[in-house]
Amino acid sequence: MHAQEDCIFCKIIAGDIPSAKVYEDEDVLAFLDLSQVTEGHTLVIPKNHEENLYELSEETAEKLFKAVPKVANAIKKAFNPLGLNMLNNNGEAAGQSVFHYHVHLLPRYGKGDGFG
Ligand code: 5GP
Ligand code: ZN
């Protein structure tokens, strides 16, 4: 499925909803999460609409994870964190609230940085 009408991330890809872009290529978009659990909290998404890890095609996974280290390094350069967590929620019970596959990149700044 290329894009889903009622998907907020498909709307961000289309430019119908504004976002603070961190990285973009033909197949992948990375933008700041609205909630900013820590400073520089970024979401990396494939441009193709696939719901979660169960649905993620090999082709999409390859394109997405090829871009992830580039996004991590862009975050490192911009925010200079001490560390970085990569997280992914699959299914409502696991905390997934947007059903367009995404990984969270969470820059870490030490104790009291807002996460964990
Ligand atoms: P999930 O809970 O599905 O793993 O993560 C979804 C994330 O998307 C949440 O952290 C939430 O803050 C973020 N989010 C939801 N709607 C928007 C939006 O319109 N713009 C941006 N930048 N982030 C969003
Ligand atoms: Zn979507």
Image (cartoon, rainbow, N blue to C red):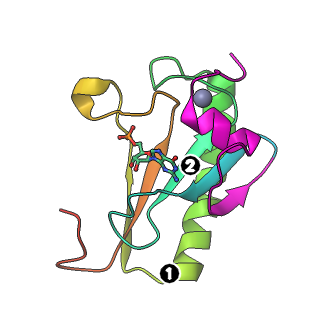
**Image location (x, y in percent) of residue 4:** 64, 21
Quadrant position of the N terminus in the picture: top right
- Badge 2: few (under 14), some or many (20 or more) residues near its Cα, within 10 Å? many
Q: Residue at x 59, y 42 (%)?
A: 45
**Image location (x, y in percent) of residue 39:** 40, 73
Whichever of callouts 2 and 1 sits on the residue coming sooner in the sequence is 2
Q: What is the three-letter code of the residue carrying label 2?
A: Val
Q: Residue at x 23, y 70 (%)?
A: 114
Q: What is the three-letter code of the residue carrying label 1?
A: Phe
**Image location (x, y in percent) of residue 25:** 78, 50
Q: Which residues are magenta?
A: 1-25
Q: Is residue 105 left or right of residue 18?
A: left
Q: Secondary structure at mark 2?
A: strand
Q: Is residue 77 left or right of residue 53?
A: right
Q: Are marks 2 and 1 in contact (CB under 8 Å)?
A: no
Q: Secondary structure at mark 1?
A: helix
Above-or-below relation of 32 to 17: below
Residue 44's disc is 2
**Label 1 near ligand 1 (CB < 8 Å):** no
